[in-house]
Image (spheres, grey):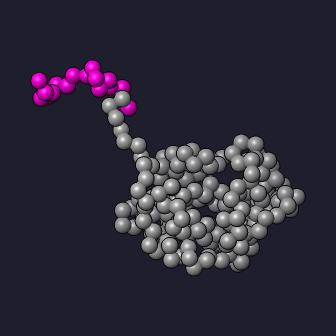
């Protein structure tokens, strides 16, 4: 398992799962995402986004962090968050913000809940918008990049991560293609 930058060919997959997981796709740009990938099967397991808000002082936000159901509980999300924080550091950000309905999860890495009034103005507006449309329980959080810490249990789980059996992709049926299976005849039908 590893985490890499998203590629152009990941765009449709990202949009499908952002929608399926009910995440924020505001100002979508695939190049802002990272994707967790299983190196054995090349299966994509999770993703997240670093979003830079241009203001008097640029603001860095982590958003749209999601893990597919079959990969949850295996450190995938933790490694996506770690990669995003590292990218923020690489872009010279000392502080990273997030607006999350899962504050307990992010607190494990050192993120701290903050008062709405402590958010930069652009993120105060985003928080209001996010609460109205996607996540009414969103909590503003931040972390100093140097304070990020990955619990060892996530590293261990990530090393052995494997997809659980799940029905992420439903089986296609004749009806999906507009075919009435009871009435259709086939050119090469061999039944009498």
Measuring from the top left, give residue 68's x and y in whole percent: 51, 55
Image quadrant where one finds the C terminus:
top left
Dominant secondary structure of the residues highlighted in magenta in the image? loop
Tell me if 98 is positioned left or right of 177 in this view. Answer: right
Write the residue at 20% across / 25% down.
Answer: 186
Q: How many marks?
A: 0
Residue 101 in picture, x, y percent from top left: 70, 55
Question: Does 16 appear above or below 146?
Answer: above
**Quarter occupied by residue 100:** bottom right
**Residue 180 visible in the current orientation:** yes
Depth check, front residue: 17 or 136: 136
Q: Quadrant of residue 164?
A: bottom left
Q: Is residue 171 above or below residue 192?
A: below
- In this rendering, the answer to whether 6 lies above or below 143 is above
Front residue of 95/154: it is 154
Picture layout, residue 140 above or below residue 146: above
Left or right: where 87 falls relative to 157: right
180 within the magenta span: yes
Determine the residue positioned at 71% across, 73% down.
110
Task: Name which residue lies at 45% across and 68% down.
Answer: 161
> In the image, residue 102 lies at what x, y percent?
68, 59
**Is residue 19 or residue 121 the one in the foreground?**
19
The reply, left or right, for residue 14 in relation to residue 170 is right
Quadrant housing the N terminus: bottom left
Q: Is residue 95 left or right of residue 42?
A: right
In this view, the residue farthest toward the right is: 117
State which region is magenta. 176-192
Q: Is residue 182 magenta?
A: yes
Percent position (x, y) of residue 127?
Answer: 77, 51
The residue at 82%/64% (across/down) is: 114
Confirm whether residue 51 shows in the render.
Answer: no
- Which residue in the rendered view is the most extreme toward the top? 183
């Amino acid at each position: 398992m590893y985490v890499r930058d998203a590629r152009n060919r990941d765009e449709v997959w990202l949009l499908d799962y952002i929608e399926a997981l009910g995440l924020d796709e505001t100002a979508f740009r695939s190049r802002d995402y990272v994707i967790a990938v299983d190196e054995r099967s090349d299966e994509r397991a999770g993703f997240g986004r670093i979003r830079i808000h241009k203001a008097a002082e640029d603001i860095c936000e982590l958003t749209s962090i999601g893990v597919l159901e079959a990969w949850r509980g295996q450190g995938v999300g933790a490694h996506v968050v770690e990669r995003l924080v590292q990218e923020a550091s690489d872009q010279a950000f000392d502080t990273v913000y997030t607006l999350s309905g899962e504050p307990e999860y992010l607190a494990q890495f050192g993120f701290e809940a903050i008062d709405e009034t402590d958010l930069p103005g652009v993120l105060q507006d985003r928080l209001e918008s996010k609460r109205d449309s996607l996540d009414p329980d969103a909590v503003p959080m931040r972390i100093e990049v140097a304070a990020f810490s990955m619990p060892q249990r996530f590293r261990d789980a990530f090393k052995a991560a494997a997809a659980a059996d799940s029905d992420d992709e439903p089986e296609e049926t004749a009806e999906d293609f507009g075919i009435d299976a009871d009435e259709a005849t086939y050119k090469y039908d061999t039944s009498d």
